[in-house]
Amino acid sequence: MIKLPKWALPILLIVVLVLTVNSTGLFALPSAEYANPELVNNGNLKSLEWKVKGVKCRGTSQFFISRIKDSGGIASIETYASTKKCLIKYDPSLTDPERIKQLIEAPYFHPESRQWIEGIFTVVD
Amino acid sequence: MAKKKKFRVTYLRYAFQIAIIAILVYLALGYGERTFEAYCPFGGVEALYGLFTTKNYTCALGEANMAMFLGLIALVVLSKKSFCGWICPIGAVSETANRLGFRMRGKKHWLPPKVDKALRLLRYPVMIIILYYTYKIGDLIFRGYDPFYLIFSGFGDYALGIWSILLMLFLLAISFIISMPFCRYFCPLGAFQDLLSWMGISRIYRNKETCIDCDLCDKACPQLIEVSQKDKVKHIDCTNCLECVEVCPVKNCLEMRMF
């Protein structure tokens, strides 16, 4: 048996916490994803990485994807709800970042309340 | 000559708890990359089913929950439930409330041991119910009852209005007269840790040759473990908070050892 000094436990906790926080990236998985088979292998795709306010869970991630995936020129989308990060690959000959941003931030018509809702998603940076 | 001040590891523990609460408040205010919820290790337990079945994280759970969950497993194996005693903010709040209650009323715990022992079993059905419905529905539907979520979100979007407020007031109030009620009776993360806590390789040992049976260690233990009756503290609720070691008047009578 090894006798442990009093400070051993706090040191152990700090080491485990630092390792844990630094290993977070190893477990990253998209909350939701989409790939357009007709475009995804196109060699001329460009990428966007945006933090989008409103992407906060798997459900909102899927809703986010549904809002832009059929707009033309979107090759793939990955969302990461825990960081609100969204990776979008698009064909620059068919769409552009300004148009994608407009689609993301456009008001949404809520069928049950029959009202337009503003600001469901906002591109933060 | 001035007497050399003794290093009190419990002060370090309080500093640890305050630092963790400060970090969580910082995250809750939206300054970090992730929200405070991302760092709850129980989220990792809740994420397991989704990961195995759909290869996705359930609802708002993510990679930080999984990393914290694996870190927690490592900690439990190395040092029993030290996460509860040193890191968990709910444990810190509950312990502080009970300490205040003890100062005001002179008694730490008002339940008979048999009732207390029976109530400790409640955390297992709580864990099973939470995991069952989270796995079945694929949503974090218990956030309205979760003190961690309610405190750090400031009774946020998923709070259940007056019910969440009443629940928190109830838990806070009983923490003054019952030692750490949420942690010991309801915490699903505590129940999960019980599966591994018994094998924690660092634990408190009592030297019965030098022990003077003052029972100060029993009175100091936030988990109400009768340290004075044991040669080594194998109890699954031990958080290695070292309160018993600090309060022991005999040098090296209580000490932490590995293996």
Image (cartoon, rainbow, N blue to C red):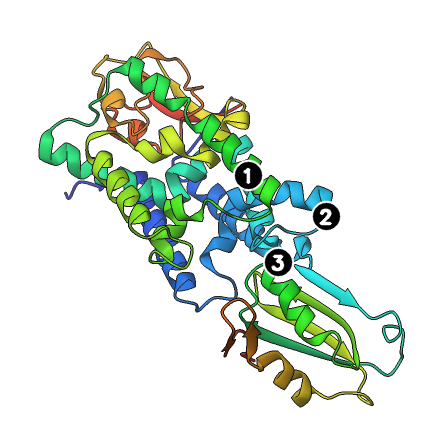
Alpha carbons under labels 3 and 1: distance apart = 17 Å
**Contact flag, marks 3 and 1 (Cβ < 8 Å):** no
Type of the residue with mark 2? Thr
Residue occupied by mark 3: A58
Name the residue that disc number 1 marks.
B133
> Where is residue A85 drawn, in percent x and y?
61, 69
Q: In what quadrant of the picture does the C terminus of chain A appear?
A: bottom right
Instruction: Pick the residue in front: B52 or B102.
Output: B52
Q: Quadrant of residue B86?
A: top left
Residue sticking out furthest to the top: B209
Subunit of label 3: A
Q: Compute the Cα span from label 2 to label 3.
A: 12 Å
- Residue visible at 41% across and 25% down in the picture: B122
Residue B236, image x and y in percent? 45, 23
Examine the rendered structure and indicate whether residue B175 appears above or below residue A92: above
Amino acid type assigned to the residue bearing label 1 in the image: Tyr
Amino acid at circle 3: Arg
Find disc 2 in the rendering and name its residue.
Answer: B54
| Residue that appears at 53% across and 66% down | A112
Above-or-below relation of B139 to B187: below
Up-down: is B201 above or below A29? above
Residue B65 or B230: which is nearer the viewer? B65
**Tags 2 and 3 both on a single chain:** no
Residue B139 percent across, percent down from the top left: 56, 49
Label 3 element class:
helix
Q: Residues within 10 Å of mark 1 (few under 14, many from 20)?
A: some
